[in-house]
Image (cartoon, rainbow, N blue to C red):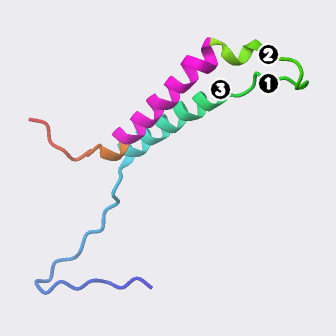
């Protein structure tokens, strides 16, 4: 149902995507960091509710995994704000 837009001066309208290859590469990198953080956060439970497992308080689940998730979110923000056509001075 898309219609062509006619310009009165005869120039064709050039449609571009908002994001480019570089943006998508950073987005997938951010998603990988977030996924790895959630994978590292999982587990550590016990099948018996009367038994407490100390593994839920180890370094991997308390420090490393949330840090990876936050880094991944930062990479996602950078990927959204990245302008690949910006010229360097």
Place residue 39 in its image quadrant: top right
Query: What residue is shown with label 3?
Result: 41
- Cα separation, mark 1 vs mark 3, equals 11 Å
Image disc number at residue 53: 2
- The residues colored magenta run 59-78
Counting from the top left corner in percent of width and height, residue 30 is at 47, 36
Task: Answer whether labels 2 and 1 touch (C-beta < 8 Å).
Answer: yes
Question: Residue 70 colored magenta?
Answer: yes
- Cα separation, mark 2 vs mark 3, equals 15 Å
Taking the spot 26% from the left edge, 46% from the top edge, the residue there is 83
Query: What residue is shown with label 1?
Result: 45
Seen in the picture, residue 29 relative to 68 is either above or below; the reply is below
Which of these two is toward me, 15 or 50?
Answer: 50
Taking the spot 75% from the left edge, 25% from the top edge, the residue there is 43
**Which secondary structure lies at badge 1?**
loop
In this picture, residue 1 sits left or right of residue 39: left
Question: Residue 71 colored magenta?
Answer: yes
Question: Please, which residue is most extreme toward the front here?
Answer: 50
> N-terminal of the two: label 2 or label 3?
3
The crowd level at tag 2 (other Cα within 10 Å; few <14, some 14-19, many 20+) is few
**Which secondary structure lies at badge 2?**
loop
Counting from the top left corner in percent of width and height, residue 42 is at 70, 28
Counting from the top left corner in percent of width and height, residue 32 is at 54, 34
Counting from the top left corner in percent of width and height, residue 1 is at 45, 85
Taking the spot 34% from the left edge, 38% from the top edge, the residue there is 78
Q: Nearer the viewer, mark 1 or mark 3?
A: 1
Q: Nearer the viewer, mark 2 or mark 3?
A: 2
Seen in the picture, residue 24 relative to 66 is either above or below; the reply is below
Question: Which of the image's four quarters has the C terminus?
Answer: top left
Task: Answer whether labels 1 and 3 touch (C-beta < 8 Å).
Answer: no
Taking the spot 88% from the left edge, 26% from the top edge, the residue there is 49
> N-terminal of the two: label 2 or label 1?
1
């Amino acid at each position: 149902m898309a219609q062509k837009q006619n310009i009165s001066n005869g120039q064709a309208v050039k449609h571009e995507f908002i994001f480019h290859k570089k943006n998508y590469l950073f987005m997938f990198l951010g998603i990988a960091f977030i996924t790895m953080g959630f994978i590292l956060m999982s587990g550590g439970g016990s099948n018996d509710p009367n038994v407490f497992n100390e593994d839920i308080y180890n370094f991997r689940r308390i420090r490393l995994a949330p840090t990876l998730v936050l880094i991944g979110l930062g990479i996602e923000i950078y990927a959204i704000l990245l302008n690949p056509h910006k010229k360097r001075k």
